[in-house]
Image (tube, rainbow, N blue to C red):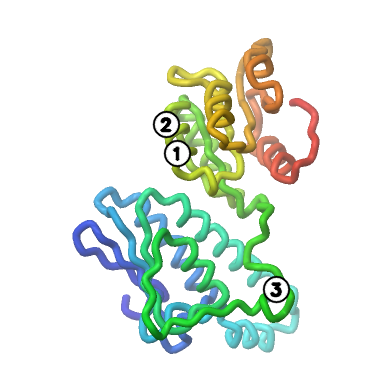
Amino acid sequence: MADDPVLLSLDGAIATLTLNRPAALNALDEGMADALYATLVKVEHHKEVRCLVVRGAGDHFMAGGDVKGFKAQLDAEPDRSVVQKDIGVMIERVHRVILNMRAMPQPIVASVRGAVAGAGVSLMLACDMVLTADDAFFTLAEATEGGTPDRSTRPTPSAATILLVEDEAAIRAATALALHEHGYTVMEAADGEEALGIARHHGDAIDLVISDVVMPRLGGPELYRILMEEGLTLRFLFTTGYAADDAAHRLAPAVPVFYKPWSASELVDRIAALLADDPVSEA
C-alpha cells in the first residue's frame, strides 16, 4: 500500500526497500520499526533477490526517531512508564533490524540524500555500501549530549545474534523458534562445515555459537578449534546428549557444556549468563 511506512519493490534480482514517511522526513516510529523487521525477513528468504537497496522517500533518508510523535504519546498517556516501555520495545526492534541486516546473505546498498540522523545513521552503517548525494548531511544527537550511540558494545540478550549448529533438524527448528520468541536473532547451520562458512562471513555479527558436540560433518570441538586458529574468538556453548562423553572438555576445555535434555527457559538462562560473562555451574 502507498501509505505503508515501508515499501518493497522488486526489479529482477534487485529489491528496493523505501522508508515511506516523507512528511516526517522518514522519522522512525513503532510502525516503521515493525515494518522494517518484517520486510527484511521477507527479503532474506526471497531466493531470487541478489541485492537490496535501502532508500528514503522524498528528499531525506531518515531524520532519526520521531521525537514529535514520542512527545504526543507522552502527552496523551498519563502513565509515562507505559510510553517509555513502548519506546524501549521499539528500540530493541531496531537493534534486531540492524543485526539482521549485518547477517543477511545479500549485499545491501544505502542510497542516501538529505538528512541522516540518529537511527538513520545506524541503518545506513548497517549496509555494505553507501551511495550519498551532494546534499546528504549526517548528525548524531549523542555527540552533543555526551550520550552513547544507539547500541552498546556489549549485547543485551534481546539484541544478540546466535549461530545455532545442530544436525538434528527437529531439534534445530525447535531451538531456533524458542530463541526467536525470546528476542534473539538466529543463524542456523546443519553441521560444523556450514557453520564454518557462516562464521567466516558474519563473525563480527555473532555474539554466541551454540553447537552440538557430535555431528557427521565437523563436530563442535573441531569447529571451535578451527575458528580459534583463524583468529575468530567467538563465545561458544556446546550441547550434547551424552553425559559421559568428555570429548568436548578434552578438545576444548575452555568451552562450557550444556547437557540435553533441557527446557527453553533453562537454555535462555544459560545464554543470558554467558552473554553477561557471569560464571555458571555446569548443568
User: For the residue marked with disc 2, what is the amino acid?
Assistant: Glu
Q: Residue at x 46, y 32 (%)?
A: 196
- Mark 1 or mark 3, which is nearer the start of the sequence? 3
List the residue tagged with mark 3. Answer: 84
List the residue tagged with mark 2. Answer: 194
Q: Position of residue 32 (x, y in %)?
A: 47, 72
Regarding mark 3 in the picture, which secondary structure is present there?
Answer: helix
What number is the disc on residue 282?
none
User: For the residue marked with disc 1, what is the amino acid?
Assistant: Ile
Pick the quarter of the image with the N terminus.
bottom left
Q: Position of residue 176 (x, y in %)?
A: 52, 40
User: For the residue marked with disc 3, what is the amino acid?
Assistant: Gln
Q: Is residue 26 left or right of residue 258?
A: left
Taking 150 as reference, is 63 above or below it?
below
Taking 211 as reference, is 62 above or below it?
below
Pick the quarter of the image with the C terminus.
top right
Q: Residue at x 45, y 66 (%)?
A: 36
Q: Position of residue 27 (x, y in %)?
A: 50, 80
Taking 75 as reference, is 275 above or below it?
above
